[in-house]
Structure formats: C-alpha cells, structure tokens
Image (tube, rainbow, N blue to C red):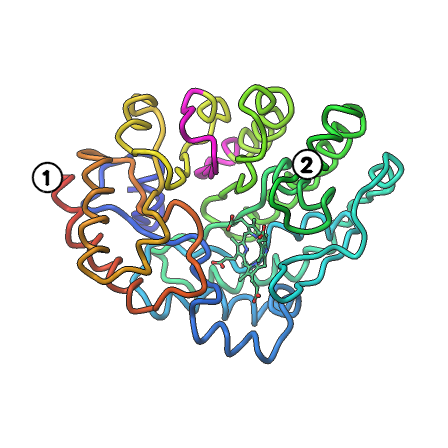
Amino acid sequence: MHKDNQIFIEACFMKPVKRTPIWIMRQAGRYLPEYRNIRSKNSFHEMMHTPDLMAEVTLLPMNRFDLDASIMFSDILVIPESLGMKFELVSKVGPVFKTSISSSGDIEKLNFNHSYFKNIYSGIKIIRNSLDKTKSLIGFAGTPWTTACYMVEGKPSKDYMKIRSLMYNDYESFDLLMRKITDATISYIREQINSGVDAVQIFDSNGVYISKKNFIKYSLPYIKEIINFINSQNIPSIYYAKGLCDSPDLIMQTNSKVLGIDWSVELSKVKSATEGMVALQGNLDPAILLCPNNVIKSQTEKVLQSFGKGSGHIFNLGHGITPNVRPESVEYLIQQVREMSSKNYE
Ligand code: 1CP
C-alpha cells in the first residue's frame, strides 16, 4: 500500500484495492444545507481565504458522508485573481470579473502575485491535519484554456467566442496569456503539494469549447507542462476532460495518470481505448442524483459494470453535483458504490 493506506491514491496508481473509491466533484457546494448556512453569513471570498473557514467547508461533506477523498474548498478562478483580475459572484450569473481582457496590453499587464495564495496554503495544512489519514486531500486548478475562457469573456458564457477569436486573430497574445496562466498554476500547485495535498486535479470544464484539432496546438502543450510537473512530484495527476472524452487518444497525450471522464461516454470504451495505461474517474450523469433510489442504484451498477473488473477506477459523477440534489441521495449513492463494487475485485 501507498502512504497511509489511502484507497483513493492506490486506485489512481492502478494498484490492487478491495472496492472502488468514491468522491464527488463539487462535493462541498450548495446542495449541502451546512454550506448554505455558512455562505449566508460569509462572502464566497471570505470562505476561500479564511483558513479555518476554508477547512471547515472542505470537511463538511467528509463529516456527513463516507467519502474516500476530500477536495479543498476553493475555485479555479483564484489564478486570474493572483494575476490581478478580481471577480465577484453575482447571483444567477456566477463569477463576473470587474474587467475582462480586451487587448494585448491587458495581457502584458497581468502580474503574478504569489502571496495572494498564502491563506489557501494555511487552509490546506489545517485540512490535512484534521482529515483522517486514510482519506486523501485533492488540490486543484483549472487548465489554462478553461481559466482563460473566463478571463477573456469576463463571465460565464454559452459559447466562449472571444477566446477563440483571440486564438485565431492574435496567437502571440493568446500564447502570452496561456504562458502566464501556466506559470502561475505551476507555482500554485507546487505550494499546494508542499502544504499537504495528496493528488491534484486539473479541471478542463471548458474543453468542450475547443475543436479537437485546435486542442493539440492551443491547449494541450500548456496542460502537459502542468501534468508533467505534478507527475514529477510523485503524486497522482487527474485530468478532467469535459467534452473531449470521446477522443481518448487525445486526452492520453496529457500524460495524466488519471483521466476524469465526463458523463457523455461509456467507460468501457475509454477503458479499452486506453488499454489499462491510465486510471479512469467517473462518470455517473449528475442528473441521476435527482432520481429516486431505484434509478440511482441501477445506473450506478451500469457505471461499475461498464468499467468492469480490475483496478484503476475511481467512482465520481461525470460533472459537478448540482445545487438541487438531496444529500440523502448522495448518501445512498456512496453506500451502493461501496456495496456493489467489491465484486469487480474478486
Ligand atoms: O467541492 C467543492 O465544491 C470544491 C470547490 C470548488 C471547485 C472544485 C468550487 C467551489 N469550484 C470548483 C471548481 C470550478 N469553479 C470549476 C470546475 C469544475 C466544474 O466544472 O464544475 C469551474 C468551471 C468554476 C468556475 C465557477 N466558480 C462557477 C461556474 C461558472 C460557470 O461557468 O457557469 C461557479 C458558479 C463558481 C463559484 C463557486 N465555486 C465553488 C462554489 C461552491 C461556487 C458557488 C458559490 C456560491 O454561490 O456559494
């Protein structure tokens, strides 16, 4: 066994385990009444940057459920903030930046301030000290592409046209932006690891907004640099590839040890295409958590059967949990995965 018998880490490295470990993307979020209560008294930024509060929120789902890994409570948009772009959470819209990038001059002005993260690192230390030793702590960041989508658009968008037009129209500025995000992200991850995270996930939630051809030139090189850095630290790298999972050959090129699979594809297909070279995380459709228990059970079984026998599966949703899910459904899901998955390892 790897350090401290962490089943999640074992599965990431495709070592033998007795059951499939489980955690849930966005598990510390708004579907939890405890989260909503804390949020009603504090701003989102206070929650991210007050170490005790960050730790408390991170541990909410761990106290309530029998999960195998905890993801630190933060956001992918801390990277733009560390580069000087501030955002606010606007109700019914999401994160909105005070100003967005609209010229090459705006990109040149971005200036990395590493001390911006100091409270996050303190929070990680508190979480790692409080968390059971057999449970893993996952650090994270967005991919440069996904992060840049928000910086150029200034807010969530249905198509992220602005970054694509920058990419075609002014490659030099696009590359400078991606370089600045990549370098900041590697510094950030290095210190997350030094502070105690056991694995790092890179979210490419906006991977769906780049063509497969353009992914190779305009997104993959920067992701690969980040993943290679995580791999050099001997902890699992997890690449969550939204919208790219029907091209396993493409996402394999990131060198990630674990591929986070979105809900649109069959795990069995990705497994055979990747020939057991990487572990797979996923991929229950988040909508299933809005269904009654009998549906949750049968669909969970389908995901477990789709991966089939052998090590290298981490159960998760195929995207983040939504705010309208009942916590009881999450509890039921975890119990089902624990009970049903052991057959795959007999
Ligand atoms: O378990 C957890 O909740 C961990 C913390 C976490 C993570 C991993 C948060 C808290 N955000 C994220 C990552 C993140 N942030 C992603 C990648 C994952 C995904 O695809 O779901 C993305 C795209 C963001 C950007 C972001 N931040 C959004 C989505 C905007 C869009 O494109 O529509 C939102 C709504 C936020 C704010 C946010 N971040 C986290 C929470 C709990 C919230 C909501 C805050 C609130 O209103 O209380």
Looking at the image, residue 343 lies above or below residue 58:
above
Horizontal and vertical percent for residue 121? 61, 57
Looking at the image, residue 341 lies above or below residue 129:
above
Q: Please give the name of the residue rendered at 43% of the width and 75% of the height, measured from the top-left corner.
A: 33
Identified by mark 1, the residue type is Glu
Q: Is residue 332 left or right of residue 254?
A: left
Which quarter of the figure has residue 122?
bottom right
Identified by mark 2, the residue type is Met
Residue 240 within the segment the image draws in magenta: yes
What stretch of residues is rendered in magenta?
A: 231-249
Q: Please give the name of the residue rendered at 50% of the width and 43% of the height, measured from the top-left corner.
A: 200
Q: Which residue is mark 2?
A: 161
Image quarter (top left, top right, bottom left or bottom right) of the C terminus: top left
Residue 346: image tag:
1
Out of 218 and 9, give the one closest to the viewer: 218
Which quarter of the figure has residue 102?
top right
Q: Does label 1 or label 2 sit earlier along the sequence?
A: 2
Mark 1 vs mark 2, CA separation in Å: 49 Å
- Displayed-image quarter of ligand 1: bottom right
Looking at the image, residue 50 lies above or below residue 221:
below
Q: Please give the name of the residue rendered at 46% of the width and 55% of the height, measured from the top-left corner.
A: 71
Image quarter (top left, top right, bottom left or bottom right) of the N terminus: top left
Q: Is residue 335 left or right of residue 32?
A: left
Crowding around mark 1 (Cα neighbors within 10 Å: few <14, some 14 to 19, many 20+) is few
